[in-house]
Amino acid sequence: MTPAQWNRLKDVFQGALEQPLQARHAWLVEQCSDDAMILREAEALLQTHETAGTFLAEPARLDPTDLETLLPGTRIGSYRVLEEIGRGGMGVVYLAEDVRLGRRVALKSLPAAVAMHPELRERLRREARAAATISHPFVAVVYALEEMDDHLYIASEFVKGDTLRSEIARGPMLPERARAIAAAIASALGAAHEAGVIHRDLKPENVLIKPDGGVKVVDFGIAQIEGPEATRLTRAGAMLGTPAYMAPEQLLGASVDGRADIYALGIVFSEMLTGRHPLQGHRDAHLALTGPYAPIIGRCLQPDPAARFTSARELMEALASDPSGTGTHPEFQQQRGPTPTRFWWEFHQGTTAVAYVLLMIPAWYARGHISGWQGRAFFIVLAASVVVAAISRLHLWFTSRFYPAELSWVHRRSSRWIRIADWVFVGTLAGGAALIGDERSVWTIVLPSAAVGVLVTSLLVEPVTTRDAFKRSGLEN
Amino acid sequence: MTPDPISELMPLVYEELRRIAAHYVRGERPGQTLQATALVNEAFVRLAAERARHFNGRTHFLAIAALSMRQILVQRARARHAAKRGGAPQRVTLDDANVADGGAAFRRPDAAPDDIDVLALDEALSRLAALDADLAKVVELRYFGGLTVEETAEVVGVSPATVKRQWAMARAWLKRALDPDATRASSGEAP
């Protein structure tokens, strides 16, 4: 559309609006008799105009928190904002450049509500000073607390990497890797506690995993703000609905020490091992408390702080001694998925299920040699036990392949039924053999042999593969 | 005194808008949104008191405030959009996918509370500006800045009647541009 055409369209559209509603169409046709395109466009616009309803009738609205956004390029003191990298209940985090020193920093803008509260502000000031004294390879360095007008910013080391949360979201970690990360966090906590800083908000979101596998704990002391006022102020944020990491004494508002962080680390550790929060839902509340690390986690999660590890150092030493006996190499293993020993267990479950179903074929012929209702009962009971045993085993196999995080729970729940079905199956085979009238029939040999075979695999082979599979993955049942 | 270039005054206005919003956040009424009109007027009252000399009168301020509001809203919508693309999978609620008043339209999840897809509107407004900068300016002032017809007329320097006519045209054009059911050969499309 040329500028001239646009101006003409504008003229006829605005002219038509001056006409009474019924006369508009005729007026337009008359005006645009020489230009069908303009007529079409004007008609369409006019129709849209008449049906536009409340479109744009109200001015834009915005959420006040939207204004906490800093546009890229904004200068905050000596920092230049590059981009927003995170947002949560405790403010917005930007990647920024310190133009004085020419380095990149993570600039956390604290919620205005916190920044404007004089008491919280003073506490944050104290805490940031203490946090800045922590020097440890696994702690993100706090550079400065900047106060600009009504706003508070914390500048700290920019760590490139994923949060532990996104790693956990991908499923349970290898126990060795989880142990190494937990030990690194414990080491970071130890340094902080010795500097007099308690983290107070340790959770997977506050642990960053660098691309090289290294660990950085961030946000030390920022959760210093406590008490009902702070809870009210920070509640509106992203923490809503996430499982708690707070120790009981912290939840109750009592004064806390480093042992609250140890509690939180116990939860994080168990979450790494199992892929889920240990207190979330009832069904696997004690999942992690059954593996080789159960004693350590159990001690971290003691409701009474005095019953926990007395210091992060002590916890770190417990983690370093590595009860699983798989080595203490500090480099974290990257691979995940079923351990080699789990393969044989899966193989066993799969083949047993198939063998059960195949055994139904000879059973069908054997049934013909058992007279009357006994033959029918023999086959029905046998079929029922095969259905239970085979489906449960295939379900276990499937879970192990595709939902390893659920395996321990599924296994615990179904193993009793599998055991019962196995015994019913064996018993029915034996009973069927006894009921066969013709003693020279081949089935009097086949059925007891099958029963013995099933008995041997259930009593000898299965416990071995199961023990290997579950012991090595830290999910011993 | 000649007015400062807009780029220098933007941070000033923007900072004031932030400060006002912070006070609302402190009041903590979750979910409550602020209307552009209230925000811009409050910012003016506060800025006028201390920094009046920076501005060539109220109209100058209003133009900058409207532009700031547009940038803020677009920036936030973009950040939300990016978070949804890159971040954890999020469910699109029924509200997000509701049916627009004009025709069945699948809304992007970052649609503003009043059901306007800010990113799409911003983009359409830029296209309109290429065709007719005056019309686009009127929309920016009235929608993003929350200005009345009279204030808009004052800022642009035309009569209120003209603003009304321009507004009607711009609104109809934008509505068509945002309506996926409208024929794509809409006014001025691909000139």
Image (cartoon, coloured by chain):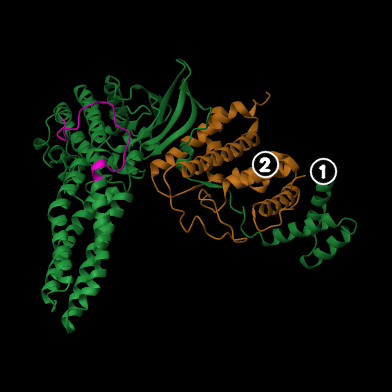
Chain colours: A green, B orange
Q: Say which element carries label 2.
A: helix
Residue furthest to the right in view is: A34
Residue furthest to the front in view is: A440
Residue furthest to the left in view is: A307
Name which residue lies at 27% across and 19% down.
A133
Residue furthest to the bottom in view is: A372
- On the image, numbered disc 2 is attached to which residue? B126
Of residue A92 and residue A291, the one placed in the foreground of this image is A291
Within 10 Å of disc 2 (Cα), the crowding (few <14, some 14-19, many 20+) is some
Q: Which residues are magenta?
A: A322-342
Subunit of label 1: A
Name which residue lies at 73% across and 52% down.
B169
* Residue A424 image point, x, y percent: 14, 67
Q: Amino acid at mark 1?
A: Pro
Main SS category, magenta section: loop
Does the magenta segment cover residue B95?
A: no
Which numbered circle lies on residue A3?
1
* Residue A205 image point, x, y percent: 33, 37
Is residue A457 something that shows in the picture? yes
* Residue A261 image point, x, y percent: 21, 34
Q: Say which element carries label 1.
A: helix
Q: Amino acid at mark 2?
A: Ser
* Residue A6 image point, x, y percent: 80, 47
